[in-house]
Amino acid sequence: MNRTTLSGDDLGKRVLNADGTEVGRIVHVEPGRAYVDPNPGLLDTLRAKLGWGTVTDTAHPLDDGSVAEITDDAIRLRGRL
């Protein structure tokens, strides 16, 4: 069974809507919430994976309750972001 609770291990992962459409990447994680950058560049993705990501004005908050599953390379949402 895959987990559904967001953690620091999820930094830089792709975020997918329930239909599989990629909507961004995780750039910051705090307890019970992560932030999704809808249009990260390569540098932003690398910073996030290293734990140096920042929450920008375009980042969307994502709560644990919105997550259907977390795999090794992606986070699939229950609905849409």
Image: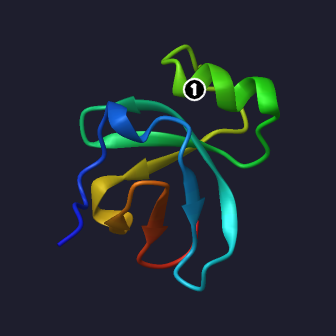
Picture quadrant of residue 64: bottom left
Residue 12 appears at what percent x and percent y?
56, 38
Residue at x 59% of width, y 86% of height: 19
* Residue placed most toward the observer, 23 or 73: 73
Extreme bottom residue here? Answer: 19
In the image, taking residue 40 as reference, residue 65 lies left or right, namely left
What colour scheme governs how the chains and residues are painted in the rendered image of this protein? rainbow
The residue positioned 57% from the left and 74% from the top of the image is 17
The answer to whether 36 appears left or right of 67 in the picture is right
Residue at the image position 62 percent from the left and 46 percent from the top: 25
| Residue 40: % across, % down | 76, 38
- Name the kind of residue labelled 1 in the image: Ala
- For mark 1, what is the residue? 48
Q: Quadrant of residue 39?
A: top right
Label 1: which secondary element: helix
Q: Quadrant of residue 59?
A: top right
The residue drawn where x is 57% and y is 26% is: 48
Instruction: Check the image and report above or below for 38 versus 29.
Output: below
